[in-house]
Image (cartoon, grey):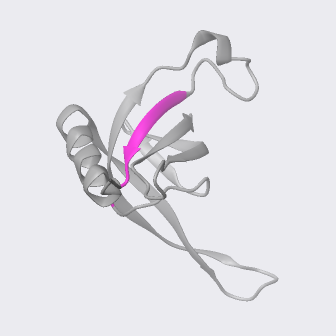
Amino acid sequence: MSEDWGQIAEEVTAALAEVGFTATLIRPGAPTGPSYDPQPGTPTTHTVTLMQDTISLGLIDGTAIRASDKLVMMAADGTVPTTADKITLGGKAMTIVRVEPFAPGGVDLFYEVLLRA
């Protein structure tokens, strides 16, 4: 019997909405102007659902993972995060350092996102 990964993704999104919180993902706009002097485009914002996770103390090395970094699970509800995006948490824009999709059946269930201030 095969799993209905689409249904499982919906259940994970609903569970994260129940226990998590919303935040704003800021995606930079496409640059405009000539290639020798590109100007930043207008950024777009997307409401995303997050749940904060913990970072194992043994993983904090001060370089790849810092003590001030935040690890969150982000619902896979249509917006796929990238390291070019930022997420606003508590009024503070944080850089996305790493994104790892959790997709055991080929369907993204959620994203593990490492944030840095």
Image: magenta residue range? 70-77
Instruction: Give the side of residue 97 with respect to residue 75, left or right.
Output: right
Residue at (48% x, 50% y) in the render:
103
Q: Main secondary structure of the magenta part?
A: strand
Q: Position of residue 10 (x, y in %)?
A: 25, 53
Q: Residue furthest bottom?
A: 34
Residue pushed farthest top?
Answer: 57
Residue 39, quarter of picture:
bottom right
Q: Residue at x 28, y 44 (%)?
A: 12
- In this view, the residue farthest toward the right is 36
Which quadrant would the C terminus be assigned to in this image? top right
* Residue 74 within the segment the image draws in magenta: yes
Left or right: where 59 falls relative to 30: right
Q: Position of residue 40 (x, y in %)?
A: 61, 72
Residue drawn at the location 49% of the way across and 58% of the way down: 106
Residue 18 percent coordinates (x, y) = 17, 37
Residue 32 screen position, x and y as percent: 62, 84
